[in-house]
Amino acid sequence: MSAGPGLEFEHDIAELEERIASLERQTDRTEDVEKEIRESRLELVRQLRETYDGLDAWQTVQVARHKNRPYTRDYLKLAFDEFVELHGDKHFGDDRAMLSGFAKLDRFKVMVIGHQKGRTYKERAACHFGCAHPEGYRKAMSKMALAEKYQLPLICFIDTPGAYPGVGAEERGQAQVIAESMFKMSRLRTPVICVVIGEGGSGGALGIGVGDRVAVLQHAYYSVISPEGCAGILWKSHEHAPKAAAALRFTSRDLEQLGVVDDVLTEPLGGAHRDHHQMASRLKSYLSKTLNDLEGIDSDQLVESRYEKFRRIGVFLDNAADPAE
């Protein structure tokens, strides 16, 4: 699949890809041209591996936001066998930034909830660029209750810069409903798997992020705040977003070291936006394995283990000498 528009750190890669495409368009290829194509492809692989193995935090954010990166609806088409969408929160309306419904993954019947951004500008505007309103989280909670009632495992896909920050959302209880959603997830008596597939920003991500297993894609990020938001607070300017990104320690490597996530899913060479099918296949394998691992665990044990898992996040040891000594 085409990577689409290049990122600012991919200038040399983009030039090499265009060179290969130009050579492959030639109708009468000589042996020398074929040799150049082979050598160029090998060089492309080398450059992609070198570049993506050494991404810094801000570059990771750019990859996580790539417009061709697979979204929740893409994974539903590629990794799941069936999907029946469920709409509305029964209070206010249907938030298109939050997708939910019944799905089938191999032998498992599951409930899926996930953020959706949209491809075209019209779709993105309708989905509020992946920023859910309170009705989105209320919709999610009603589907969680349905999953618990019928003992369906819950799978959540996280991909949002944050919950919608508008006045209307605040008037309808944005902060309260996110807290309620987190509380409800912590007590669900059915297996819960959460995967950060792109952006994992602030409370908007945490609202559907309390699970028995929490995973993150290799080039996604999961953070208490967006880099721009952090830079605006600390340095009063979004120009310092790269500095904020480095300080926040929200890349997959950092998250795994800090114990915030359980698993990191390796992306195809050059990022998930370069190969949707391969990434979907890896995601499907992970979900199937994890569902098998969680199957049969007693509901009380699931809830207790989930609670202890999140209580351990942020634990540290103070090695300072005891003043009494």
Image: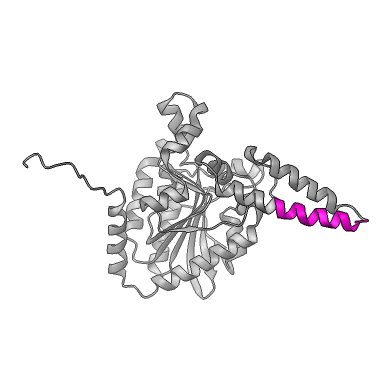
Where does residue 176 sit, x and y in percent of width and height? 35, 43
Left or right of residue 73: residue 91: left
At a point 53% along the width and 47% down the height, the residue shown is 97
Left or right of residue 19: residue 238: left
Where does residue 66 sit, x and y in percent of width and height? 61, 45
Seen as rendered, the residue at the extreme left is 324
- Dominant SS in magenta: helix
Where does residue 317 sit, x and y in percent of width and height? 23, 48
179 w.r.t. 297: above or below:
above
At a point 64% along the width and 57% down the height, the residue shown is 276
Please state which of residues 324 and 236 is positioned toward the viewer in this rendering. Answer: 324
At a point 37% along the width and 46% down the height, the residue shown is 177
Q: Is residue 91 visible?
A: no
Please state which of residues 197 and 99 is positioned toward the viewer in this rendering. Answer: 197
Where does residue 114 sit, x and y in percent of width and height? 50, 54
272 w.r.t. 8: above or below:
below
Magenta stretch, residue numbers: 28-43
- Point out the image quarter for the C terminus: top left
Query: For residue 32, which quarter of the picture?
Result: bottom right
Please state which of residues 189 and 85 is positioned toward the viewer in this rendering. Answer: 189
Number of callouts: 0
Residue 82 magenta-highlighted: no
